[in-house]
Image (cartoon, rainbow, N blue to C red):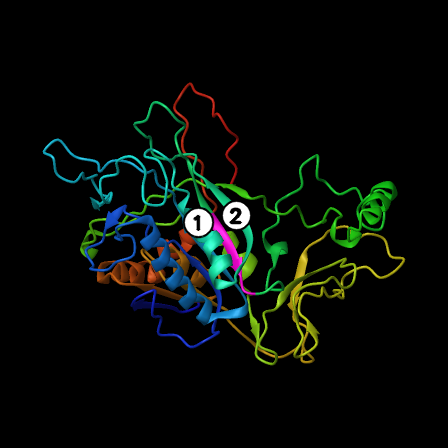
């Protein structure tokens, strides 16, 4: 059981040294959605621009504590420009269990940033582009979190929003990644045929070479296919003991955090070179480029031939699997320490719970004493820790109805 540290603190001023965190996974408060009862809280700004400025200031602090080879994953939801919602008594609206709504000033006509009333503001993408333009980060991917059991909306002239964005940002082109840990089984259209040295037919390999592609990296991987950019994951209700006295909570589903922790934080960090160990599979085809450190002349993305793998002239192994972990330093037998995973807007502690359950050091930070108490319960509760490693289950289908989608874990 890896330790999880729960800190009451501000995401804009973390009590951590520079470059100490391997992975950051977080979901900041969305613009003008909930009032958590703290003056100056993120999300309570008067305009979308002020919210973005505050969030970029937070991100600059996260970049400070993130290792050069670390990754940052940020989940954000969008918002429409609209009039302040009013309840029947004329006061600011409430939703049971969701806290006091604060929709911001009444919008009429065009906003200061030129967005028309009823327009989707595009705040997640404005944030991501600002991270690149202002902070010099590299945007590696946009993950669409599709919610098959999303809440209904009382609209009649547009589609219901059933997704949120998760942005993957890094500090440098070469960074830690272990996607072999989270590959999916091949389907009939992606199953490798090993009809050539690269898992491609000779004709396909020649065509890719002519286009300047690295054929060694284009073939079907026997361990499975890469995760796509759309993750269909149901939201997960959280049952909190009454003794904790917490009235509201909005929790990440552990299934959203699990592949990020496994794919972008090392299971162990080498104490000799300070870099994360990467998975090694049998049947490796030798070296493959990855991130490098010019100062030490190490190529930490190289893949290592497993002792169980095939050599030149050998047949393909009957079963492909991850057989161990290695880094590129000169002391392959050096001990390791757990990676550090941080959530600066920790909330109910889902990121810390999943990271700790999978052997990482976890740090969760939040301004709210209630949320810190809730997070402390979750990371230590055996039942919650067991659920953090469970595969998600699709929402139930009413009797007599067929599911509209094939909802897979």
Residue under circle 1?
Answer: 126
Q: Name the residue at 56% across, 57% down.
A: 263
Q: Mark 1 or mark 2, which is nearer the start of the sequence?
A: 1
Q: Name the residue at 81% across, 59% down.
A: 310
Task: Answer whether residue 254 is visible to the viewer in this image.
Answer: no
Task: Answer whether residue 262 is visible to the viewer in this image.
Answer: yes
Q: Is residue 14 above or below residue 142?
A: below
- Find numbered disc 2 in the image and state the secondary structure of the residue it sits on: strand
In this image, 319 relative to 369: left or right?
right
Q: Name the residue at 67% across, 41% down.
A: 186
In this image, 162 relative to 214: left or right?
left
- Find numbered disc 1 in the image and state the secondary structure of the residue it sits on: helix
Q: Which mark is residue 200?
A: none
Q: Which residues are magenta?
A: 166-171
Q: Is residue 190 magenta?
A: no
Asked where in the image residue 290 lies, by quadrant, the reply is bottom right
Percent x, y of residue 92: 16, 40
Residue under circle 2?
Answer: 142
The answer to whether the residues at label 2 and label 1 have Cβ atoms under 8 Å apart is no
Percent x, y of residue 9: 29, 68
């Amino acid at each position: 059981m890896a330790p999880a540290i729960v800190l009451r603190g501000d995401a804009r001023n973390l009590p951590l040294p520079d470059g100490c965190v391997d992975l950051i996974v977080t979901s900041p408060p969305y613009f003008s959605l909930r009032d958590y009862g703290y003056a100056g809280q993120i999300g309570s700004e008067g305009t979308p621009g002020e919210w973005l400025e505050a969030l970029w200031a937070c991100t600059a602090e996260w970049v400070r504590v993130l290792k050069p080879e670390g990754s940052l994953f940020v989940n954000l939801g969008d918002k429409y420009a609209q009039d302040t919602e009013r309840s029947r008594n004329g006061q600011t609206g409430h939703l049971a269990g969701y806290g006091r709504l604060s929709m911001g000033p009444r919008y009429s006509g065009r906003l200061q940033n030129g967005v028309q009333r009823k327009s989707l503001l595009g705040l997640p993408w404005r944030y991501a582009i600002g991270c690149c333009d202002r902070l010099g980060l590299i945007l590696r991917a946009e993950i669409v979190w599709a919610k098959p059991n999303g809440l209904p909306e009382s609209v009649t002239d547009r589609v219901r929003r059933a997704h949120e964005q998760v942005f993957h940002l890094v500090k440098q082109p070469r960074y830690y990644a272990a996607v072999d840990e989270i590959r999916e089984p091949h389907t009939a259209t992606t199953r490798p045929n090993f009809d050539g040295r690269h898992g491609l037919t000779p004709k396909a390999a020649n065509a890719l070479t002519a286009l300047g592609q690295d054929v060694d990296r284009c073939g079907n991987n026997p361990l499975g296919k890469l995760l796509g950019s759309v993750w269909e994951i149901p939201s997960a209700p959280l049952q909190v003991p009454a003794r904790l006295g917490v009235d509201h909570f909005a929790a990440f589903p552990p299934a959203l955090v699990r592949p990020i922790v496994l794919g972008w934080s090392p299971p162990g960090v080498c104490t000799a070179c300070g870099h994360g160990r990467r998975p090694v599979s049998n049947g490796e085809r030798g070296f493959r480029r990855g991130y490098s450190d010019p100062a030490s002349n190490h190529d930490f993305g190289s893949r290592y031939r497993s002792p169980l793998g095939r050599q030149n002239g050998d047949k393909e192994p009957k079963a492909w699997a991850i057989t161990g972990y290695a880094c590129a330093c000169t002391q392959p037998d050096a001990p390791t320490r757990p990676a550090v995973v941080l959530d600066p807007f920790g909330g109910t502690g889902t990121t810390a719970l999943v990271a700790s359950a999978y052997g990482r050091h976890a740090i969760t930070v939040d301004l709210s004493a209630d949320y810190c108490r809730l997070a402390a319960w979750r990371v230590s509760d055996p039942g919650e820790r067991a659920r953090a490693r469970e595969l998600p289950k699709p929402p139930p289908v009413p009797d007599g109805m067929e599911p509209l989608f094939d909802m897979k874990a």
